[in-house]
Amino acid sequence: MAGFGTSIGRPIYGRGPSPGLRFTVYAILSLTLMHLDQRAHWSERIRYGLDAAAYPVQIAVNSPLAAWHWMTDSFSTRGTLRAQNQQLHTQVQELQLAMLRHQALEQENAQLRELQAALPPLIKKWLVAEVIGVDSGTLRQRLIINKGRHQGVQLNEPVVDGTGILGQVAHIGPWSSEVILITDPEHAIPVQLARNGLRTIAVGSGNTDEILLPYLAANADVKSGDLLTSSGLGGVFPAGYPVGRITGVRREANQLLAQVRAEPQAKVGRAREVLLIEFDPANPAAPPAPEALAEASSPTPAAAASVVPSTEKPEGARRDKPKAKSKANSKP
Amino acid sequence: MISRETLPIILLTSIVALVLSILPLPGWLPVIRPAFLVLAVLYWSTMAPFVAGMALGFFGGLALDVFQGSLLGEHALALSFLTYLALRLNLLTRAKPIFEQSLYVLVALLAYELLLWLIDGWTGRSMSSPLRWVHTFIGALLWPVIVGMLGRFHSAR
């Protein structure tokens, strides 16, 4: 401490209030912020402004990765491009074929429901967004995407990729939004086994390649390889979209519930581009408004089992916000 | 003594540390990624306590909250607390050998993570995973490297 005071010439404890007092001030400030963020909703506005400030940095942080992808894309060989083109071509033909049948089925469905006109298309609007940030810590499974309020993103909008459901929009900024993935431990999605229609809730595990089904009874009819689709309950996700595939069922004699694990269908850890989907509430497959949900209780015991945890899980329930009132007459 | 001229360097290194903290990384790397910003703030508030004050800790933590989407104020509180400890104890810790400093850093990082863990628990966010503690040990191991790197930016005490 030789040259003390010579370089700046200040007393030993600096100017201004003592560290203890300053810490108290900052601690109170932090606690107030935390309280406001947790309880009051106007703190959304602070976040919104801060998100706007954060956006350029997010872009900058993502730019090395983006540059790498751009490089690999632009320097890919003619051969790879040809192969890719060929593959896409076959894929388009397959999809067109499926689409032909799909339209016929939709027509038939409308007739069966005795509606005069054909049903409106399920997807009203969709938006392609690029992933500009990944927050896949041990506890959080989130994506930051480059579309926000200015591009018409809405809260709780379902986010999918070409293969299945990825998650939903948890938080909107002006030009970017945060997506909570189905693998986040705070996320729960109502699902249904495609094979027998058994309904339950799938909760994230914190790993990108696993979701858990903690509320299935030990004697439930579920086995490895079963496909999980969204059940359409809960008011966020539409019915019938693939969510995951069961990878393991463990039953223990002294446990009432089975331990069931599933693997997400969507490429949760690898998605670079995602689709944001807005549904037409007039279509019966669209997610119903929560008030319609309360009345529509199903007689199967499995449904009763699925309703209980959904009320216990505040995360699942909190995100169920009504987007638009679904028309009562479209539900027979 | 580190003078006020170091302030731009302190800010610059803190921003670089922040970027390293939020850079998207594949696979298992996020688990073992040390809390770069926390280490940088610890270093500067120990070595330049009159230049890098508690404001650096608070606003650095706030930036972490914004970028990581955690509860607003959570990291800010934890990091201001660490800065406070560093400011109070800097005369004790800065003269110690580097190995002993690493132990202090380990304790500080554990306290930081404990505080975050408690706040997560109180606000109903956490699903506690033992992996969240991994970075504290990595950070302590990396401390000599951090000291070596950041020490180049200012003249010796």
Image: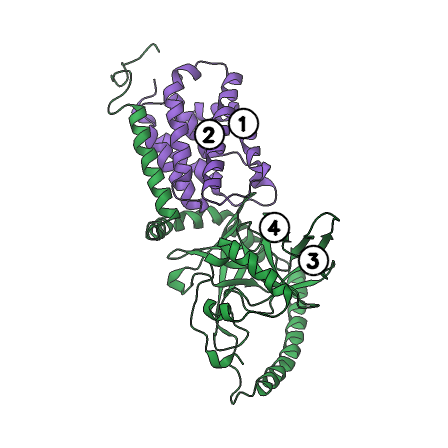
Chain colours: A green, B purple
Marks 4 and 1: which is nearer the front?
Answer: 4
Work out how far the residue at label 1 is from the one at label 3, CA to CA, in angstroms: 41 Å
- Chain assignment, label 1: B
Disc 2 and disc 4: Cα gap in Å? 28 Å
Cβ atoms under marks 2 and 4 closer than 8 Å: no
- According to the image, label 4 marks what residue? A208
Work out whether residue A137 or residue A74 is closer to the camera in this orientation and state it: A137
Sequence-wise, the earlier of marks 1 and 2 is 2
Per the image, label 1 sits on a secondary structure element best described as helix
Q: Which mark is residue A246?
A: 3
Disc 2 on helix, strand or loop?
A: helix
Q: Quadrant of residue A246?
A: bottom right
Q: Say which chain tag 4 marks.
A: A
Of residues A99 and A200, the one drawn nearer to the viewer in this rendering: A200
Residue B115, position in %: x, y?
Answer: 46, 33
Q: Is residue B1 visible?
A: yes
Q: Which residue is mark 1?
A: B142
Does the CB distance between marks 1 and 2 fall below 8 Å?
A: yes
Gap between marks 3 and 4, in whole Å? 15 Å
Residue that numbered label 2 is attached to:
B39
| Residue type indicated by callout 4 | Thr
Q: Please tell me which residue is depicted at 31% across the width and 12% down the height of the picture.
A: A3
Image position, residue A215 (x, y; %): 63, 55
